Image (cartoon, grey):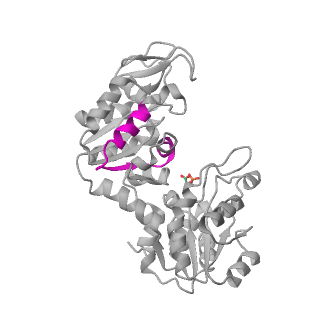
Amino acid sequence: KKTIKDIEVTGKTVLVRVDFNVPRNKETGEITNDNRIVAALPTLKYLLEQKPKAIVLFSHLGKVKTEEDKAKNDLSVVAPRLSELLGVDVKFVNCTRGPELENAVKEADNAQVILVQNTRYEKGESKNDPELGQYWASLGDVFVEDAFGSVHRAHASTAGIPAHLPSAAGFLVEKEIAYIGKAVSDPERPMVAILGGAKVSDKILVIENLLKIADKVIVGGGMTYTFMKAMGHEIGNSLVEDDRIEVAKEIIEKGGDKLILPVDSVINNAFAAEGDIKVCGEDIPEGYMGLDIGPKSVENIKAALEGAKTVVWNGPMGVFEMEPFAKGTIAVCEALANLPDANTIIGGGDSAAAVMQLGYADKVSHISTGGGASLEYMEGKVLPGIAAIDDK
Ligand code: 3PG
């Protein structure tokens, strides 16, 4: 794969797609977690050292469907934080096309960093409108893809621009691919996959693909109860996807001994941190719902992880945001922390948030910056943002 070190950038205008889609406080709009900005720094610092003419940064922020969504997802919030972290002035351009942007790029000198307004302000972004990709490409000389979190999107800024320019992967994309790619294509064994989260429908493809690759596949989280129902158990008021019972049955059959399902749950009579919280076996009484895996399941998971050399984990084991239902997720964090020689990889999204919130971030090998992207990668899919670079 062509990386940033394989392309000449000195004196050039370098366009970089970053993923600055950061979580923000709903009321104040303040950035609540700047990991994705921090994750882009190695590429940006390297580029600064190469003395390009300009570094033009493109990112989306949130979902922009209506005019009102624009104000809520104004990318200018990122500029001061980026400037502080990078230690250089960042010029924010409050538009996505036209003379203001074109002049800012033209007049830039001495590795000036320019941040363009939210790419999703353009309707053509999500449709990968060829005109838009070509227009943005016309602003620069080379393109660097460093938005790992967005490489599963075939959008104008991720896949359109590189169709027109010499392109390469940035250090973040390179690192993500090195970790996740090795884990799913050439893992050191035994390899264990842990899959949680609320919905079976989100995880069917990844469970199916990882059953082909891993030595063991552990399932937990809200999707457990669809599997439990498929096995004929009582699940009370637990979350269930009735239209996925059949596929759950197929997965159980295909999975055989490889598939490890919970054997007990922490249940409550309400979706709340208080109530009649207790542990029960495979059958959940009426009026109760499963909100975490139980202690026997935790022991089974620990045993399954013993001696593992590669672990990939996507999706929490329970409603870890509520303290009484965090034990399963904490136990997985601890089990991974006890595997210092293993390659332990956390998919982005909720499991990444769990590992960080629970204080285990420095105890694992890699936490992906991509939620959907890491999931699709583990599903074995082609990621359009990466394919666009490979095609060059
Ligand atoms: C993410 O947060 O997973 C990426 O930034 C992609 O965002 P999207 O799901 O809105 O395309």
Q: How many marks?
A: 0
Give the x, y percent position of residue 234.
41, 17
Work out whether residue 9 or residue 213 is closer to the camera in this orientation and state it: 9
Q: Is residue 254 left or right of residue 170?
A: left
The stretch in magenta equals 328-354
| 338 to 265, vertically: above or below | below
In the image, 279: left or right of 321? left
User: Residue 203: percent from the left, percent from the top?
Assistant: 42, 41
Image quarter of residue 308: top left
Residue 324 appears at what percent x and percent y? 50, 25
Query: Could you tell me if residue 262 is visible in this image?
Result: no
39 within the magenta span: no
Instruction: Residue 361 in the image: state x and y as whole percent.
Output: 45, 47
Residue at 66% in and 73% down: 114
Q: Is residue 176 left or right of residue 106?
A: left
Q: Is residue 204 above or below residue 342?
A: above
